[in-house]
Image (cartoon, rainbow, N blue to C red):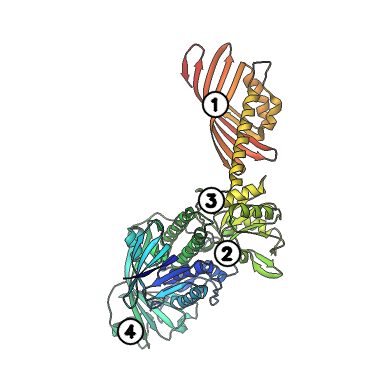
Amino acid sequence: MDDSAIESTPVLVVGGGLVGLSTAVFLAWRGVPCVLVEKRQGSSAHPRAIGYTTRTLELFSRIGIELPPHDGSGPRRARVESLAGQWFEEYPWSPGGTKLPEIEYSPHKGTAIPQDRLEPILRDKAIELGADVRLNTELIDVVQTDDGVIATLRHRDGRETRLLAHYLVAADGVHSPMREKLGIGRSGQGLLAVQRSILFRAPLDEYLEHGIVQFEIEQPGLSAFLTTYMDGRWVLMLSDDVDRDDDEQRAVIRQAVGRPDLDVELCTTGRWELAALIADQFRVGRVFLAGDAAHQLPPNRGGYGANTGIEDAHNLAWKLEAVLSGRSTPDLLDTYDAERRPIAWLRHEQIFARADYKARLQTAVADVPIIDDDAMELGQLYRSAAVLDAGQELPRALRPEQWAGQPGTRAPHLKVLIEGTEGSTLDVLQRGWVLLSEDQRWQDAASRACAELGIDLAFVHIGSDVKPTEPLAFQTAYGVTADGTTLVRPDGYIAWRAVTAPTDPAAALTSALGRVSCAAAQTLAQRIQRLEDVEAIRDVTARYATAVNKGWNGKTVDLDVIPSIFTTDARWVSSDMGIATEGLDAILAGLPEHTAVVQFSMHAFLNPVITVDVDTATGTWLMWVASIIGNDPRAVYMSADMAYTRTAEGWRIHDVDIHQGMLLSATGATTQM
């Protein structure tokens, strides 16, 4: 081994296929130096993937990669005896149902390009942007340390060198040596079949005139799958795992086509596992799994294989950049697994909910509702620490117009004018953090949040910076009012929104951005603000206790101050005492009645646990009450759960929930209440 110099890089990417190259491109575009190693000389001889979805085209377009246009529709499939024989039926990927509205979800459409044509485009782009792409270089060992990973690389000439990286992205395929080394297991439907594939050229364009590009061959003695790469090449897939010589390959191709005289040019063959398996974790320490290493999904018309991996790469790239730059803590990297693994499972589930693969299941599973294509592609939901208000009660995917700007979903596309030119809201997203609002006042809030957190945040004023072509379109699509706002992450997903403007927009935005970005800077101003909030909450609680005290020096219950303590929709509840009072007016009316039999009372709220979340807070208190009721002195220890709301006049009590505890009477008796 050559130990003369240990190289270093922020990120090492292992694997030079679609996902590895996409990772290198997305990192380099964000200015993150990276080294990519690939043990092969270039792309596989087999084209493999061909269909790329709308979302993938959005991601590539943003970094300057424009792919050939296509009509955007998914591949059509038919059951046939053979291409020249009887055609039985065409059947869709997603069954038809309720007529859905015609909505333009994106300025981009999916396309078809063979993987071995796309990979060189990505490789050239990665190099152009500054990535160090090393072919004929194999990773043979990795050791993780507290500071990074030490990789041992073997070069084409047999030399071995070491490279130190802060992080490693393993995009090394379905058999991922990196995943195996880490001991990460996999779950799912498992192995479905061992496939043999024959790539060939033949003059078959006449069979594409009806728009069908995939054919399930069903005839006595032959069950196969035949499809085209739209460039003169075709692939025949067979599930019998039989090794055929050249003459036998030509014979089975002619049988599938139904033309014994067909001129066939053989290109190459392959043997691979048709399987569905998801890694049990996508991260161990400083190593991340992406693409097939993380989720092996069988080829399908939804584009759930390569496209899922490409979005893995996009999701991870911005997070690595944020952490490596020091703006975010490493906690942000935990959200990669939290967000992407559920998406892999959702796609695994949806593959087997459809007819293409449902018949392959050896064991029956419960019927799974089929999610429509637009929801699966553009309406998946992320739940993680990098998203606020995406609760477990929400569905895993809906169409964009159904979400209407829900945090955790892709920011919707709207047609807008940008400097007089027609464009999309997507054109101002997917580079850094962006705040969108029709209310110009949020610009000051964005500036303050940026200054306090050290997170770059661009404010885009809807109505001047970008102008929607339809009135109220932004409010409808993003689910906010005219003074609300939406915070969009660097990957184009919504992290947080304020449907209406809060009392203190700057404080609300700073708190939200600090949380979802895992901001490394916990500023002095933030700490002071929290201390001031806690002190104000203690004060309003103490004033409540004073207001209801009575019985000495002429003190009576002070109803006049109650409106300055409670919100107008406040609740006072004690199920133990059978009291449930809702609304400020009801509290004012009920206090004289509930305290009439009390000659003396002194309240104290002690040992609070207070949690502040922007404009709301909760407090759990030990409540001590000394009283005289019917000439019977007593002391009661109870607990009080209280909720607070920040108003324009300051903090107010919104909820009081009293739980009985222990009663001490003057007679010495102790009663558990």
Give the CA separation, mark 3 to mark 2.
Answer: 23 Å
Q: Residues within 10 Å of mark 3 (few under 14, many from 20)?
A: some
Count of marks overlaid on the render: 4
Question: Decide: marks 1, 2 in contact (CB < 8 A)?
Answer: no
* Mark number, residue 532: none
Q: Which quadrant would residue 271 be assigned to in this image?
A: bottom left
Give the CA separation, mark 4 to mark 3.
Answer: 55 Å
Nearest to the eye among marks 3 and 1: give it.
1
Q: Give the mark nearer the N terminus: 1 vs 2.
A: 2
Q: Position of residue 478 (x, y in %)?
A: 63, 56
Return the residue at label 3: 390
Q: Position of residue 410 (x, y in %)?
A: 56, 60
* Mark number, residue 250: 4
Residue 262 drawn above or below residue 43? below
Tell me the amino acid under the disc marked 3.
Ala
Q: Position of residue 128 (x, y in %)?
A: 51, 76
Asked whether the viewer can see residue 79, the reply is: no
Return the residue at label 2: 431
Q: Residues within 10 Å of mark 1 (few under 14, many from 20)?
A: many
**Who's the residue at 42% across and 82% down the image?**
233
Tell me the amino acid under the disc marked 1.
Met
Return the residue at label 1: 623
Tell me the amino acid under the disc marked 4.
Arg
Q: Give the mark nearer the N terminus: 1 vs 4.
A: 4
Q: Which quadrant would residue 242 be assigned to in this image?
A: bottom left
Q: Give the mark nearer the N terminus: 4 vs 3.
A: 4
Q: Residues within 10 Å of mark 2 (few under 14, many from 20)?
A: some
